[in-house]
Image (cartoon, rainbow, N blue to C red):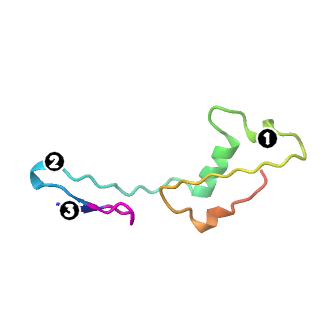
Amino acid sequence: MRYDFPYNWAGSIEIPDSNLVEIYEQGVRMPEKQESEIIKEAVLNPIGTSPIKDMVRSGQKVLIISDDNTRSTPREYRSLIQKY
């Protein structure tokens, strides 16, 4: 079996049928909430630290940058800037 990786830089591999046990495919899972709502909840209720509002004083500015290099960042979330 020939497997082509879904990344241009990764190429492909040939797996002999005698070595192939099973093929697993990722299932499609629909999120229960919109991504923007999940992001908002995560910012307001972080795990393992205090909320940002408890760490800064009035008048200070905060910049949060996060990206997942395993997939493209959707354009609509590149500039998700709001005050909470």
Q: Residue at x 83, y 39 (%)?
A: 56
- Residue 11 is tagged as none
- Mark 2 or 1, which is nearer the eye? 2
Q: Report the residue marked by disc 3.
A: 2
Residue found farthest to the right = 59
**How many angstroms separate mark 2 from mark 3 (CA)?**
14 Å
Q: Residue at x 64, y 63 (%)?
A: 78
Tell me residue 81's x, y (percent). 73, 59
Q: Report the residue marked by disc 1.
A: 53
**How many angstroms separate mark 2 from mark 1 (CA)?**
51 Å
The quarter of the image holding the N terminus is: bottom left
Tell me residue 16's x, y (percent). 13, 55
Q: Residue at x 49, y 59 (%)?
A: 71
Horizontally, is 9 left or right of 24 in the view?
right
How many residues crowd mark 2 within 10 Å: few (<14), some (14–19), many (20+)? few
Q: Amino acid at mark 2?
A: Val
Q: Report the residue marked by disc 2.
A: 21
Q: Name the image quarter holding residue 2.
A: bottom left
**How many angstroms separate mark 3 from mark 1 (CA)?**
52 Å
Horizontally, is 64 left or right of 35 in the view?
right
How many residues crowd mark 3 within 10 Å: few (<14), some (14–19), many (20+)? few
Secondary structure beneath disc 2?
loop
Kindly indicate whether the residue at mark 1 contacts the one at mark 2 (C-beta within 8 angstroms): no
Identify the mark nearer the N-term, 2 or 3: 3
